[in-house]
Amino acid sequence: MNSSIKNRQAFLSCFYTFIRFFKRMGFVWFVWILSFNISFANSSNCYAIKNTDAKNFCLAISQQQASYCYSIRESDDKNMCLAQVKKQKSSCYSIKSSDQKNQCLALVP
């Protein structure tokens, strides 16, 4: 088997593993991954996001305004947003999902 086929198989294996992981973690990981790019983005880009919760998360992070976090319907995502914007770990402890709570505690200084 030549190296290009092996490389392709390795890539596809990693890609499918990522997809399975992403499906399990869902919206939270999507928002968290995007937040790194969003934090440096112009907040006007956030308005192009169709998902209301994702849009509010984007606006909260990019403008550092907790008021947008309160518009997020899902409570764990709202608490994650508040913890990141306010830089307060106390909001992390209100998160019900243990994985998301640990993620929050790891991210918030």
Image (tube, grey):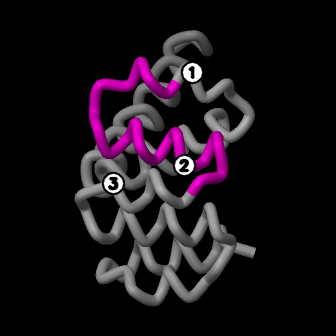
Residue picked out by circle 2: 60
Q: Is residue 97 above or below residue 47?
A: below
SS at mark 2 in the image? helix
Quadrant of image for the C terminus: bottom right
- Which residue is rendered at x = 42% and y = 26% of the image? 12
- Per the picture, the main secondary structure of the magenta-coloured stretch is helix
Q: Residue at x 35, y 46 (%)?
A: 22
Q: Earlier in the sequence, mark 1 or mark 2?
A: 1
Pinpoint residue 58: horizontal percent, then vertical percent. 51, 40
As helix, strand or loop, the secondary structure at mark 3 comes to helix
Q: Is residue 26 left or right of residue 40?
A: left
Residue 16 forms part of the magenta stretch: no
Q: Check residue 106 in the rendering and tell me which mark sits there, or answer none.
A: none
Q: Residues within 10 Å of mark 3 (few under 14, many from 20)?
A: some
In the image, residue 57 lies at what x, y percent? 46, 47
Q: Residues within 10 Å of mark 2 (few under 14, many from 20)?
A: many
Disc 2 marks which amino acid?
Ala
Name the residue nearer the viewer: 44 or 50: 44
The image quadrant that residue 47 belongs to is: top left
* Residue 32 placement (x, y as % from top left): 51, 50
Task: Report the residue marked by disc 1.
Answer: 44
> Badge 1: few (under 14), some or many (20 or more) residues near its Cα, within 10 Å?
few
Residue occupying the point 29% across, 25% down:
50
Dot 1 or dot 3: first in sequence order is 1
Q: Which span is picked out in magenta?
A: 46-65
Count of numbered tags: 3
Residue type, numbered disc 1: Ser
> 59 left or right of 56?
right
Horizontal relation, residue 109 to residue 103: left or right: right
Q: Which residue is mark 3?
A: 71
The image quadrant of residue 39 is top right
